[in-house]
Image (spheres, helix red, strand yellow):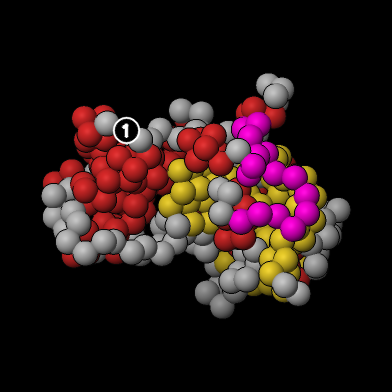
Amino acid sequence: MTAASGDRIVFEDVSKFYGEILGVNRVSLNISPGITSLVGPNGSGKTTVMNLMTGLLRASRGKIRVLGFGPDEPEMLFRLVGYCAQFDSFPPGMTGFEFVASYLGIYGYSRRDAVRRAEAAIDRVGLTEAARRKAAGYSKGMRQRIRLAQSIAHGPRVLVLDEPLNGLDPIARAEAISLFRSFAAEGLHLIISSHILHEVDVMSDRVVLLNNGYVVAEGGVRGMRDEMSEHPMQVLVRCDRPAQLAAKLFERALVVEAVAQDDGRSLFVRTKDADRFFASIGEVVLSSNLSIESMAPVDDDLTAVYQYLIETGGSVS
């Protein structure tokens, strides 16, 4: 096992078919430590990728290695990986603490070690006060957190989290994202699926965009956005004289479209050369004695990247 393979999650030309139904097709990934988010609509292949990664499914073809170990080494794989599925089911009458500790007992820890690890994991997800209450009575957010505690209690190096932000209120989501970032800072691999795109954008080191079982694109959000050279960036500018600003921008060929908004103080523009636009607009404003209140990209985020790549069939230049 090389040092590189021991620090990566690697998919090599992996496909999974359910009979004649495509799960994922020819997926190749090389995932380093940090937060990698899987994004895609229902049926895109996100959960299939996660189940292949955790050894719950076997690939129809291709090769998978998780930190150097494959699905034919389940004992090592389960030691390395913590999995928090999207759906849950708690044994009747079991408290949150018992839920976490019982799985550690099954895993092979002594009662003393299971108790210690369960308490530490529950404390880390901020559920200590509710730990002795029955898990079946937990709110959706509490259920999410106790399952996260169960997935981290054995000290895995890889966390696979399917829709972990689902059902959390805004404060709990912010706390969860902060916790995920702390795991990443410790050198863990976090593989997270989510449909909350702006939060994926904020927390992710990289994203993998999936559609119809194929990897549409992967990398940093900004890196993928920069590659979309044929897709003009959209910018909303608030200023005192939008019409005059539009004329000056066209005069310097800085935009391909400019539309004044109904409020009389906003200008919506499209530019194919964002770097040149942002480098030059200050000079335009000063030379024309204009006053700019604000300026922000409208689509410099994961939503726009994903929508564009899906519409174009995943082609980036």
- Looking at the rendered structure, the kind of residue marked 1 is Tyr
x%, y% of residue 152?
Answer: 38, 40
Q: Which is nearer the eye, 288 or 87? A: 87
The residue sitting at 33% across, 60% down in the picture is 168
Q: Which residue is mark 1?
A: 109
- Relative to 83, say whether 113 is above or below: above
Q: Quadrant of residue 92?
A: bottom left
261 on left or right of 121: right
Q: Which is nearer the eye, 175 or 50? A: 50
Provide the residue span drawn in magenta: 57-72
Element type at marker 1? Answer: loop
183 on left or right of 170: right
x%, y% of residue 169?
Answer: 31, 61
Magenta stretch: dominant secondary structure: loop
Q: Is residue 51 visible?
A: yes
Q: Quadrant of residue 302?
A: bottom right
Q: Which is nearer the eye, 151 or 221? A: 151
Q: Is residue 106 magenta?
A: no
- Relative to 13, say whether 245 is above or below: below
Q: Is residue 59 magenta?
A: yes
Q: Is residue 235 visible?
A: no
x%, y% of residue 37?
Answer: 57, 50
- Relative to 154, say whether 46 is above or below: below
The residue sitting at 17% across, 61% down in the picture is 93
278 on left or right of 295: right
The residue sitting at 63% across, 44% down in the picture is 71
x%, y% of residue 221?
Answer: 65, 49
Q: Quadrant of residue 124?
A: top left
The residue most toward the top is: 3
Dot 1: within a 10 Å radius of its alpha carbon, few (fewer than 14), some, or many (20 or more) residues? some
